[in-house]
Image: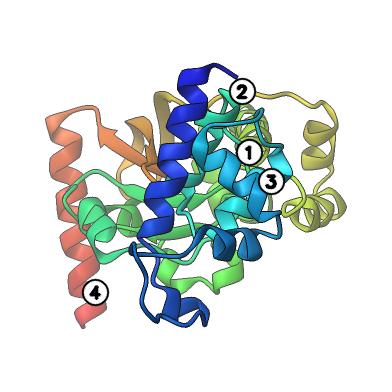
Amino acid sequence: MPASAIHSLGTFLRDRRTRLDPATFGFAAGRRRTPGLRREEVAQRANISPTWYTWLEQGRGGAPSIEVLDRLAAGLMLTEPEREHMFMLALGHPPEPRYVPPQGITPRLQRVLDAFPVSPGIIRTATWDVVAWNAAAAALLTDYGKLPREQRNILRLMFSSERVRSAQEDWMSVARFVVATFRADAARAGASGEISQLVDELCRTSEVFARLWQSSDVTGHGDGLKRLRHPELGLIELEFSTFAVEGRPDLTMMVYNPTSEALATDIAALIDQTRRATAA
């Protein structure tokens, strides 16, 4: 571990320690020479020796282990970006991904989706549960709001919904692509354990899924062209792009853009029709 990295790690730890309120953790505030927690209090919270923690702040000794870094992250109440930064300083690489179940999205993120008036947009988790969508997605793809929460899963829809299956121009190619991308997403987010129940369920209910899952294919999503058969608009083409949500490694945004002005006009009319039907 280079001396400069050791010094930077110590500075980072000291800075985060001084930002913490002792009363929040049940420590007596009293008269303190400096703000924040004392070194021995951080060591107590992280379950490491005060001497070792002092050395870390002073830039002495070698690099701490992954276990110690995780204890420090918990003891200092680091955010996920702060935890990743600490690992980069200490070890030169980010921590292994760990899956955190999604807690929904912020209103700000929903407004981003809603800003696409004729481009269907969804936000899905690493386990491919759809947790947010816009009016264009509801009108053109699937009205997720009408589905029970457990059914708002792209894999379940792809392999159990005849409507979704018949809408794909080449269902088998799409299914193969979806399974390979799903596998990569879950592994990247550290959610391999969380998907086991869903995988077991789909293997029991779909021979095709079971065969595709056993093939162990992996691919990335990126962007591309999606062709759909819509009951009212006929065969349509949409360009799709995927975006990581900063600070939320569990979430991915997907946006489908119409490939022509005529299709954009048709989608706008369909959205309006759907809204009027809902109001009625």
For the residues labelled 3 and 1, say whether their Cβ atoms are less than 8 Å apart: no
Provide the secondary structure element on which disc 3 rests: helix
Dot placed on the residue nearer the N-terminal end, 1 or 4: 1
Q: Is residue 257 left or right of residue 177?
A: left
Residue 277 disc label: 4
Dot placed on the residue nearer the N-terminal end, 2 or 1: 1
Residue placed under numbered mark 1 in the picture: 182
For the residues labelled 4 and 3, say whether their Cβ atoms are less than 8 Å apart: no
Q: Is residue 166 left or right of residue 184?
A: left
Provide the secondary structure element on which disc 1 rests: helix
Q: Position of residue 225 (x, y in %)?
A: 39, 24
Provide the secondary structure element on which disc 2 rests: loop
Looking at the picture, tell me which residue is in the foreground, 129 or 138. Answer: 129
User: What amino acid does circle 1 point to?
Assistant: Phe
Q: Is residue 34 left or right of residue 264?
A: right
Dot placed on the residue nearer the N-terminal end, 2 or 3: 3
User: What amino acid does circle 4 point to?
Assistant: Ala
Q: Is residue 232 left or right of residue 209?
A: left
Label 4: few (<14), some (14–19) or many (≥20) C-alpha neighbours in 10 Å = few
Label 3: few (<14), some (14–19) or many (≥20) C-alpha neighbours in 10 Å = some
Measured Cα–Cα span from mark 1 to mark 4: 34 Å
Measured Cα–Cα span from mark 4 to mark 2: 40 Å
Q: Give the number of the mark in front: 4 or 3.
A: 3
User: What amino acid does circle 2 point to?
Assistant: Thr
Residue 111, quarter of the rendered image: bottom left
Residue placed under numbered mark 2 in the picture: 219
Residue 68 disc label: 3
Picture residue at 44% right of the left edge, 25% below the top: 222
Q: Give the number of the mark in front: 3 or 1.
A: 3
Quadrant holding the C terminus: bottom left
Measured Cα–Cα span from mark 2 to mark 1: 9 Å
